[in-house]
Amino acid sequence: MSLTADDVNKIAHLARLGIDKQDVGAYANDLSGMLDLMIRMSEVNTDHVEPMAHPMDQAQRLRADEVTEINQREAFQVIAPQVEAGLYLVPKVIE
Amino acid sequence: MEWETVIGLEVHAQLATRSKIFSGAATVYGAEPNTQACAVDLGLPGVLPVLNQEAVRMAVIFGMAIEAHIAPYSVFARKNYFYPDLPKGYQISQMDHPIVGVGHLDIEIDGLIKRIGVTRAHLEEDAGKSLHEDFHGLTGIDLNRAGTPLLEIVSEPDMRTAKEAVAYMRKLHELVRYLGICDGNMQEGSFRCDANVSVRPKGQVEFGTRAEIKNINSFKFVEKAINHEVERQIALIESGGKIVQETRLYDSVKDETRSMRSKEEANDYRYFPDPDLLPVIIDEAFKAQIKAELPELPEAKKLRFKAEYHLDEESIAILTVTRPLADYFEAVYKKSGCEAKLCANWITGDLSAALNKAGLEINASPINAERLSGLLARISDNTISGKIAKQVFELLWQSTANADDIIAEQGLTQISDTGAIETIIDKIIADNPSQVEQYRSGKDKMFAFFVGQVMKAMQGKANPAEVNKMLKEKLNS
Amino acid sequence: MHTKTLAELSLGLQAKTYSSVELTQFFLNRIDQHQQLNSYITVTPELALAQAKAADQRIANGMSDLLTGIPIAQKDIFCTQGVITTCGSKMLANFNAPYSATVVDKFNQAGAVMLGKLNMDEFAMGSSNETSYFGSVKNPWNINTVPGGSSGGSAAAVSARLAVCATGTDTGGSIRQPAALCGITGLKPTYGRVSRYGMIAYASSLDQGGPMTRSAEDAAIMLQTMAGFDEKDSTSVDIPVPDYRIGLNKSLVGLKIGLPKEFFGEGLDENVAATLASAIAEYRKLGAEIIDISMPNLKLAIPAYYVIAPAECSANLSRFDGVRYGYRCESPVDLTDLYTRSRGEGFGKEVKRRILMGTYALSTGYYDAYYLKAQKIRRLISEDFKAALATVDVIMGPVTPSTAFGIGEKMDDPIAMYLSDIYTIAINLAGVPAMSIPAGFVAGMPVGLQLIGDYFSEDRLLNIAHQYQQVTDWHNFIPTGFE
């Protein structure tokens, strides 16, 4: 399986990941190499195998419905690139 | 050509938990921007979600109320997309294994019952809000709402008119409020809906291409938005056009729907199980516990109120909107020993009006069931008249005294002493010869004048039935 | 003082042979003298000395823990309130976390002294420490070779005695592989044993923090502090933490060691194989029984890992968007530009490669063939471990196919780099604990022996490692120039 430069650009857009034009070919090549590794998986029959999402066969623990957090806006926004009036600012969102 | 509309609704109900679904931040509406967004809600690096038990309990209660299958095993998944109000770049939601499976809700349309299928209901986190007022051409992001628990309730495409859609939405609204799992406040966005709308030639089995209308936040708009969308689709098809599957936004100001291209672009959500959360296991014990706590459901309650109390439909509808109100009614009925109708009239009338005016819920009523019962009992046993009762009600509202003390203190006890009433009546007949003449010559309306005069003379304390009876005797003799 | 282990230094502090301030200053001086290794991203002398002073006070008051006053260092993946946490990335080059990781809190409570934050592959993605935004780390045994990764800074610092011990994290071998290449002891605990709260996620279902130390005994002391249930981490396991030192001296007579044939086949350097054979012979002398086993699905670990880890990372790294913290590009023209440039400029090549791979594996039309398939393979691999560990007490094998490779040698061939993780990755997929311990040298470069145990058998692994270290001294060797 090999990916084209066009495929890479599409995936990069889905991931909102800027990629230098001159690197697209190299990424396509690397990803194709990774996909070649995956071929080995398709050779194994897994028809009756349950997918495994977690190493531990455990159930989600539930938390009591209690407010435990206090307002820390100042501490959180000191590290923000751009804030005003307590809001995070981003380029205009068009709906 | 005759067209048929097909509608399915996705309703988002914010669950009335104190804290968020995956963090301990508060969920109170209207706080200063970003003061209720903790490290987890902000998606800071390394922080992790832990599931709120109450959100799970509420979802299960809802599932039981619509007789749905409760999944013994449900899974949270990440729905990936970039948007500034979505801090992690993914929303934690449920995809393949929702907590609530197939159920149903019955609606009434023109006296007929129609069953609407509920495909599923799943838990997810709400996003923040983008504030579009101008910050030098930039958008402001408030993440207070991010992480608020939502129950997304997805219906089957079973509705055929906007009216049915509204009836379904109202029914759902009534149910979640009744169950106490959502405050139902639509202005604040606690209960909102997306509508999937398509049209097809009548008789055709396959569905037409649908458009999804996003974020409708009132019953009125649901109806308008759907009707508009239907008109748009029919007009488009009839003029030779083709419906494209897309997301549209209802603009309530212009009363139209328009395409939301920004949401359309590249909607490959790449769902996969969230590795930070483990499967939610709901065992029989958990279900049994919730079942035991499950309140009598609105439908059952309405039927019982009708059979047990013989109330009219309108009173029943009002009394059963929320559980606290229904409980209040039943408490007053039991304590006062009065007729159900009298109890219902006072609760849906004077009490509701006063609560509305004060902006209070029944739970915060200054007059509790016990004190209202005391008042109604005195009406029932003729100690006071209806008119005096209104005065006593006012005093009950303003003080903490009970009705008997107020009646005694203010000397409001109704006079049933026929001797006292007779004396007054005789005096009034004597003082108003011309009115007596008019009445006796056939002007029946004058009777009310005499009643009024007697009541006035007795400061409203005379037993009205006794006054009527004696007046009739005297005037007709 | 740098030749002493954590256990020995702890005794010295208790006996007041030296103070924590002296010890801390001594290590700060060594860090300063050996900057060429580039093992630290941030050194925190003022904080360290203040903590040392407090530790001395605590020792004087008789309120101390084994770690009180011990100068340690944190992999820069653990958030530390008040000290920049970079995760080896330009994206977080100035990130000051408003909270600390649970692991960091635990060390603070124990009174440990933090010397600084250790270099690492960017977002823990790498096997050579060359993907760090802050430059590659050098292996103290030969500065032209890599220290391994992603916890390369941790391994180099402990190996060169620039910290008594360090934390690491292991997603596909990131504790064990650098420990092997730098000649130290590294333990990846059972998934869920150590809290992941505040540890910046690479692949959430695989990531696990653990100790990187001179000896197994030191690892036991460190793990004692790191392990435990954390209600802030849903994947943290709520079972009691045993006393890890109590069983260190148990005899190994009758110990069943399984050697999977898949670990000793083609691809393993013959000198490394010979070194491992002597190590296993040593175990035989200690009374262990050697059993040949087979784990047929091990060969599927690399493909499954390179689907699952990138898939999880593609979502985990979406939060780095230039909105709330971290790197933001200059003058974005619109929202898409803000995202693509902030992320494009903030992430390095290897991170991008994995985000792209993961995004692809999860996208419509490929999910079943890649992601779901990989999860099923994961089940098969985990069942191989369960079956093997039902018949043997411990599985042994190599950590790496060869000793440390040259800096730059594999940077242009990511696939070759991925293949070097062949012996470590399956362990993370299964979630079992595993260690790397120094087992000898090939041409002057350290070789690690891997010990793999059943879920929550860290105490047993530490015992097995400790017994070996009682009869060998590979773990006491110090690289030339750092004596």
Image (cartoon, coloured by chain):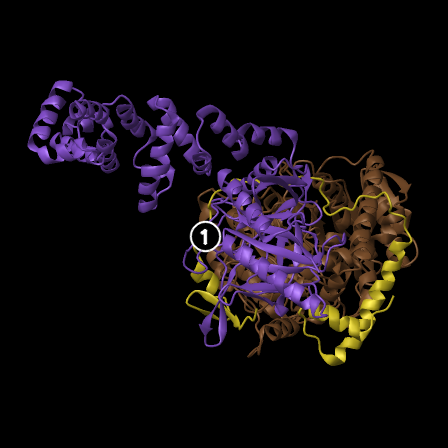
Chain colours: A yellow, B purple, C brown
Q: In terms of depth relative to the viewer, which is nearer, B226 or C299?
A: B226
**Residue C67 in the image, given as x and y percentages of width and height:** 56, 48
Taking the view exactly as shown, the residue that stands out farthest to the bottom is A22
Q: Is residue B346 left or right of residue B226?
A: left
Q: Is residue A77 above or below residue B205?
A: below
**Residue B151 in the image, given as x and y percentages of width and height:** 58, 47
Query: Image quarter for residue B350?
Result: top left
Label 1 neighbour load within 10 Å: few <14, some 14-19, many 20+: some
Q: Is residue C2 above or below residue A82?
A: above
What chain does badge 1 belong to? C
Q: Is residue A85 left or right of residue C424?
A: left
Residue B100 visible at all: yes
**Residue B289 in the image, given as x and y percentages of width and height:** 57, 29
Q: In terms of depth relative to the viewer, which is nearer, C304 or B179?
A: B179
**Residue A32 in the image, given as x and y percentages of width and height:** 84, 68
State the SS at label 1: helix
Q: Is residue B121 above or below residue B271?
A: above
Q: Is residue B424 above or below residue C52?
A: above
Q: Is residue A47 left or right of residue B172?
A: right
Q: In terms of depth relative to the viewer, which is nearer, C63 or C337?
A: C337
Q: In terms of depth relative to the viewer, which is nearer, B328 or C269?
A: B328
| Callout 1 amino acid | Ala
Query: Image quarter for residue B279?
Result: top right
Taking the view exactly as shown, the residue that stands out farthest to the front is B441
Q: Which residue is mark 1?
A: C54
Where does the N terminus of chain C fall, quadrant-wise? bottom right
Residue drawn at (7%, 27%) of the image: B427
Where does the C terminus of chain C fall, quadrant-wise? bottom right
